[in-house]
Amino acid sequence: MSIEVKDVMGRVAIAVLEDASFADIVAAMKRYAVGAVTVVDADQRPVGVVSEDDLLLKETDPARHAVSMFESRRQRHEHEKAAGVRAIQLMTSPAITVTPGTSVRDAARLMHDRRIKQVPVIDVVTGRIVGTLHQHDVLRVFTRPAAELETDVKAVLADPEAFTIEVDKGVVTVSGRVQWRSQAIALVEAVRAVEGVVDVVARITAGNDDLVVVPPLL
């Protein structure tokens, strides 16, 4: 069973309007104990995100009021952010979003690739923000009940009755016998792909090794 964002996301949409002040943003971060807030337009659609890094430019960019013809586009953009006082001036845009139906695995990959700790969740029809997905929400898949995880593991096995499954703190031990070694490898990979599996211990024997490469006769 694929776990989706709607199964783990926070139902509170942590967001501020485009005209929110610097102080309003800091207050929202403090209130919800988060490192970023989504910026939404009047229709509650995400248009960007303000992170702690964006706000820190106010302190770390002493040249925010100076302009140089030799500075890069990135430096100019950072100077503009450092001088900003409203969310629309401080935010990084566009906002990176997911939907309730996005798989947690895909959301985790997105957050890792973009190096972000949280993403707004939007309604697939209206585009409005309906919640927030944090890194700790994604990690909840690794605290699934053992019985639930065992059920999902058995679901990926062609003949679950032929194997013994043990689950301990997310580590799945699979014991049994298959005809071919390639089947054992495929089985382990299928179990490893189940969301919530921390690791797989394979105690599987194979009757035949179909992965042995026989050198050609001279």
Image (cartoon, rainbow, N blue to C red):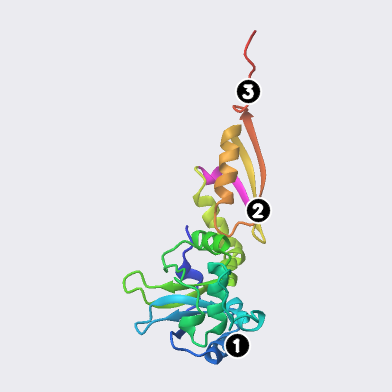
Query: 149 or 182: which is nearer to us?
Result: 182
10 Å crowding of disc 2: few (<14), some (14-19), many (20+): some
Task: Give the answer, above or below, for where 196 lies relative to 76.
Answer: above
- Using the image as rendered, state which of residue 157 and residue 84 is in the foreground: 84
User: 27 or 176: which is nearer to us?
Assistant: 27
**Viewer-side label of 1, 3:** 1
Against 147, residue 38 (above or below) is below
Residue 203 magenta-drawn? no
Note whether residue 80 is visible.
yes
In the picture, the disc for residue 30 is 1
Give me the residue at 50% from left, 90% from top: 21
Q: For the residue carrying disc 1, how many other residues have a C-alpha within 10 Å: few (<14), some (14-19), or many (20+)?
A: few
Q: Is mark 1 on a helix, strand or loop?
A: helix
Split into 4 quadrants, where in the image is the C terminus?
Answer: top right
Of callouts 1 and 3, the N-terminal one: 1
Give the residue type at disc 2. Answer: Asp
